[in-house]
Amino acid sequence: MRTGSLLIVMALVSYSMVQADEGEVERSAVCDLNKSANIVIELMRAGDLGSILEEHTPEQLDVLIKNFSPVLMAFEAEVLSCTLPVLLYFYRTTDAHRAVTDAFIAALASQYSDRAKIVAIDAELFFSLAQAVDVQETPAFGMCRERRIEISVVGNDNVGQVAKLVE
């Protein structure tokens, strides 16, 4: 499967995630990678991953399933295929000031929803992803522009600088 085909598949996976979210009463401005990964997993378990593809061969679907984890599919759909800049928010559930940081991030998401997307990533749950982008301390914030990820702000003392990343 070529890279272009993979990007189309990821866009379709992302579209299906948006469709699955429409049933909710209130939609969060911050995308939770765990929720996106769970949608991909549910589609795979139900054998419905192929249903979101308009045209595919069994071989193409097999390559997708065998070579990409549900987390990487969700990450690709939510982050790497997004045309807007994406603010990555890595956190741990045990972070001392997590509630305050979450509230700040939610306010930031509503303020900049037309200029950036925010994706929250649990660094403990998705430790391989956090390690791949060299997150050593949380909270950590990075920007993804044009498929390039840069971790720019780390630690509770620097959370105020996050708005500058989005601007």
Image (spheres, rainbow, N blue to C red):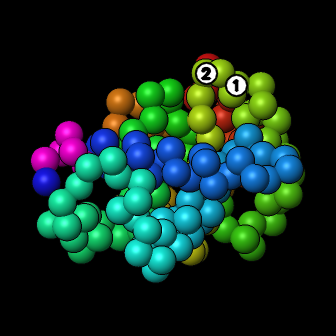
State the residue in front, 138 or 123: 123
Which circle marks residue 112 in the picture?
1
Q: Residue at x 79, y 42 (%)?
A: 106
Q: Is residue 157 left or right of residue 134?
A: right
Residue under label 2, please give it: 115
- Whether pointer 2 and pointer 1 mark residues with C-beta atoms closer than 8 Å, the reply is yes
Q: Residue at x 48, y 47 (%)?
A: 14
Q: Main secondary structure of the magenta part?
A: helix
Q: In the rendered view, would you say 26 is above or below 83?
A: below
- Is residue 68 within the magenta segment? no
Which circle marks residue 135 in the picture?
none
- Mark-to-mark CA distance, 2 and 1: 5 Å
Q: Secondary structure at mark 1?
A: loop
Determine crowd level at label 1: few under 14, some 14-19, many 20+ residues with C-alpha closer than 10 A.
some
Q: Residue at x 66, y 35 (%)?
A: 162
Q: What stretch of residues is rendered in magenta?
A: 2-6
Residue 73 can be seen, yes or no: yes
Q: Secondary structure at mark 2?
A: loop
